[in-house]
């Protein structure tokens, strides 16, 4: 008997007391999925988003769409980056104001981990922002690139449009399902890399980017 | 012939051979430094959790939803596991099944050997600790590098984890510095010279030490917090980014996942991604969560394996009452709130699953043959704090009582060859009544102390009533006259520590 059929047999024997009815009828789940979270007590949704991203010690700036290239240039300067990698799908206009920064647009073949490690920063778009938790989700579409890009360089400049920010986790999960069904991975980012492993004192920056610089664009870029 | 080890050796001995809880607890209590570290840590995180949970006005609804989803999965596990396997396979992952630890280890070793790699980087994973994968890999000539900061501290310190979430919680900063200075250089990039005990610099030393390992790694081993049946996705929730490194950079990824980790649908994440971070690290959201569905073209590992393990879980599943323990999402809130855990730490539980959840889960999945597993259900004051914080509504205190009955039954069956009814449930009810009011408890304990009939330092107050206790004590193999009741002792010690 294969390991699988043996385990399945054990499970069936273990569950002999469970009536043979559909799971959804056997155990109802008292929950309505995909609802918006009421943030009215905390403030206006974008303000809550900004405040909660900042709570993780990330930097957040807000700008009108026309100023995005300047905001990106400022972010690279503020984090001390002189080189940056960008995914192939990123709008090249976004980089037009960053004089003095060496950009690498990643094409095939991909950069090796060691090559990525020698680049200061990465600039990407994002998929969804979650106000209640201060979370930014990447679905790794063409303007966000593969996962390693936003992981190995030490500074992540990430752009999010105001209309991409939702109230809470339920709305975000609902929006993200198509990307998952398309086979794309997701990365949820809430502040820079952090640890509390030593005496529970929070230290920012262990392995992921130590600087998270968020640009919130008023209209969709 | 002695062979050189590839990775730091863990302490000698097997966890299952650990002494009974009261014995181990007394040993751990002798370590004043550890008690101070634990006290500080559990206090801090417990207060933070209360704050993070207090922000949510629908917390109880979320808990009910989380408990129900898990309960639905457990009661209909075969169909969800079949669906998970089909979705994962469709997404390009290879699914393996392992009945026990030995089978799981064999599968992982074979997969690593097929790649030709002699090392793996590891994401902190309870399942791989449970099956003792690192030692099995070491014996096969494969070095397993732990990459979570706390796990690194434990591994380099020739130590064992003492907490689910912060495995090195029993160590303070200067101990961590000493471990790094003594050991890091033996296994890769050494710490910077003159390393001090500032956590910022210690974390930086870990970053330096592990970066080279991440960049060259060809194989990673992970667990998963959730395995989603309908989309065939695995989820890893973490803080440091070591998980992302392991899940993204290597060519081969092997994830060892308990069969109870399955969730029916991607939508279910909205419940668990609200429950887990607040219960666990006490944050609105943990820094990083990775979700991947098999192999994703042009992004991350292309050789993706998932090893689904039973290893005793079906034994827990067979007990209609006990199976609720399998809902556990390993958040560790029950450890942090537990007055017994706070005092003795995780090592006394003789398992990778310590604290209240360990006290009910270990005897279920490992059985009640060993001394330590028989003693674990008694490692509690039944104060019920764990039940209140559990995000998936596991009735932990009830299960402790339930498991006590099972231990007593097992012992009686062994001693007499027949099953006898036992006094335990009656005693527990009485115990609960006593515990409900601390004046009653203290009075009862005083009586206990005088009579000298007790169950050992940590269980003396459980059935602190003369009649049931006497019955209980007869069935036990210990009768240590205490010099202090638990509560006296706790009060006195806590008062002392708070002055420090
Ligand atoms: S039993 Fe509940 S509180 Fe304890 S670790 Fe598991 S989920 Fe968390």
Image (spheres, coloured by chain):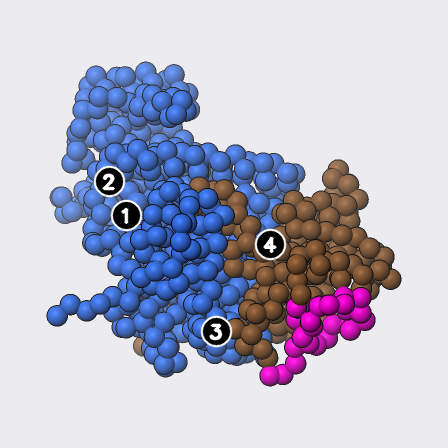
Chain colours: A brown, B blue
Where residue B11 sits in the image (x, y, percent)? 24, 53
Where residue A58 sits in the image (x, y, percent)? 65, 51
Q: State whether discs 2 and 3 lie on one chain.
A: yes
Name the residue that disc number 1 marks.
Answer: B350
In this rendering, which labeled residue sits more in front, label 3 or label 1? 3
| Badge 2 density bin: few <14, some 14–19, many ≥20, Cα 10 Å | some
Tag 1 secondary structure: loop
Tag 2 secondary structure: helix
Q: Which callout, 2 or 3, points at the residue further toward the start of the chain? A: 2
Name the subunit of mark 3. B
Residue at figure coordinates x 74%, y 72% from the top left: A90
Cα distance between the residues tagged 2 and 4:
39 Å
Q: Report whether residue B225 is seen.
A: yes
Residue at figure coordinates x 59%, y 40% from the top left: B52
- Left or right of B441 in this view: B230: right
For the N terminus of chain B, the quadrant is: bottom left
The reply to whether the C-beta atoms of the residues labelled 2 and 3 are less than 8 Å apart is: no
Name the subunit of mark 1. B
Name the residue that disc number 2 marks.
Answer: B24
Name the residue that disc number 4 marks.
Answer: A192
Cα distance between the residues tagged 3 and 1:
33 Å
Specify whether tag 2 is near ligand 1 (CB below 8 Å). Answer: no
The reply to whether the C-beta atoms of the residues labelled 1 and 2 are less than 8 Å apart is: yes
Where residue A93 sits in the image (x, y, percent)? 81, 71
Give the residues in magenta. A83-109
Q: State whether discs 4 and 3 lie on one chain.
A: no
Where residue B153 sits in the image (x, y, percent)? 37, 52
* Count of numbered marks: 4
């Amino acid at each position: 008997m294969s390991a699988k059929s043996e385990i399945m047999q054990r499970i069936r024997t273990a569950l002999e007391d469970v009536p043979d009815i559909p799971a959804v009828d056997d155990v109802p789940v008292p929950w309505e999925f995909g609802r918006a979270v009421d943030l009215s007590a905390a403030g206006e949704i974008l303000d809550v988003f900004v405040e909660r991203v900042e709570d993780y010690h990330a930097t957040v700036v807000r700008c009108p769409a026309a100023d995005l290239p300047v905001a990106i240039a400022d972010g690279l300067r503020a984090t001390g980056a002189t080189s940056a990698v960008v995914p192939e799908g990123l709008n090249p206009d976004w980089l037009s104001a960053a004089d003095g920064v060496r950009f690498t647009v990643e094409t095939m073949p991909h950069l090796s981990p060691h090559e990525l490690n020698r680049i200061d920063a990465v600039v990407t778009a994002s998929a969804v922002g979650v106000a209640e938790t201060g979370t930014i989700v990447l679905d790794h579409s063409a303007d966000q690139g593969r996962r390693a890009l936003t992981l190995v360089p030490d500074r992540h400049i990430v752009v999010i449009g105001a209309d991409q920010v939702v109230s809470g986790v339920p709305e975000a999960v609902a929006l993200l399902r198509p990307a998952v069904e398309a086979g794309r991975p997701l990365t949820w980012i809430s502040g820079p890399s952090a640890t509390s492993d030593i005496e529970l004192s929070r230290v920012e920056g262990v392995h992921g980017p130590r600087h998270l610089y968020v640009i919130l664009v008023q209209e969709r870029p | 012939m002695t062979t050189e080890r590839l990775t730091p050796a863990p302490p000698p001995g097997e966890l299952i051979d650990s002494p009974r809880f009261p014995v181990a607890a007394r040993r751990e209590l002798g370590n004043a430094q550890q008690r101070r570290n634990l006290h500080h840590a559990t206090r801090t995180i417990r207060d933070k959790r209360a704050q993070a949970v207090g922000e949510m006005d629908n917390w109880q609804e979320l808990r009910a939803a989380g408990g129900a989803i898990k309960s639905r999965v457990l009661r209909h596990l075969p169909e969800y596991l079949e669906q998970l396997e089909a979705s994962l396979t469709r997404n390009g992952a290879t699914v393996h099944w392992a009945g026990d630890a030995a089978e799981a280890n064999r599968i992982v070793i074979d997969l690593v050997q097929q790649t030709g790699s002699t090392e793996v980087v590891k994401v902190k994973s309870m399942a791989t600790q449970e099956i003792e994968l690192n030692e099995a890999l070491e014996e096969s000539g494969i070095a397993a590098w732990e990459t979570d900061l706390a796990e690194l501290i434990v591994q380099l310190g020739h130590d064992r984890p003492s907490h689910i979430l912060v495995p090195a919680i029993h160590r303070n900063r200067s101990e961590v510095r000493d471990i790094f200075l003594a050991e890091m250089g033996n296994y890769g990039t050494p710490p910077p010279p003159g390393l001090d005990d500032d956590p910022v610099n210690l974390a930086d030393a870990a970053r330096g030490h592990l970066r080279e390992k991440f960049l060259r790694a060809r194989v990673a081993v992970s667990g998963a917090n959730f395995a989603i049946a309908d989309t065939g996705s695995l989820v890893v929730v973490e803080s440091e980014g070591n998980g992302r490194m392991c899940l993204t950079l290597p060519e081969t990824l092997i994830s060892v996942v308990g069969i109870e980790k399955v969730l029916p649908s991607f939508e279910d994440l909205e419940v668990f991604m609200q429950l887990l971070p607040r219960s666990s690290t006490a944050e609105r959201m943990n820094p990083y969560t990775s979700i991947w569905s098999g192999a994703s073209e042009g992004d991350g590992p292309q050789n993706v394996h998932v090893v689904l393990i039973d290893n005793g879980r079906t034994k827990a599943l067979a007990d209609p009452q006990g199976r609720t323990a399998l809902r556990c999402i390993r958040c560790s809130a029950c450890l942090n709130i537990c007055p017994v855990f706070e005092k003795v730490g995780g090592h006394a539980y003789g398992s990778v699953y310590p604290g209240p959840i360990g006290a009910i889960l270990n005897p279920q999945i490992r059985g009640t043959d060993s001394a330590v597993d028989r003693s674990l259900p008694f490692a509690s004051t039944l104060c019920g704090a764990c039940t209140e914080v559990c995000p998936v509504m596991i009735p932990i205190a009830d299960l402790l009582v339930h498991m006590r009955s099972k231990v007593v039954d097992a012992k009686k069956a062994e001693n007499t060859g027949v099953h006898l009814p036992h006094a335990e449930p009656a005693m527990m009810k009485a115990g609960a009544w006593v515990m409900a009011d601390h004046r009653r408890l203290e009075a009862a304990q005083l009586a206990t102390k005088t009579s000298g009939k007790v169950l050992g330092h940590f269980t003396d107050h459980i059935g602190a009533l003369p009649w049931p206790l006497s019955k209980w004590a007869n069935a036990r193999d210990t009768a240590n006259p205490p010099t202090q009741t638990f509560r006296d002792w706790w009060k006195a010690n806590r008062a002392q520590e708070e002055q420090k």
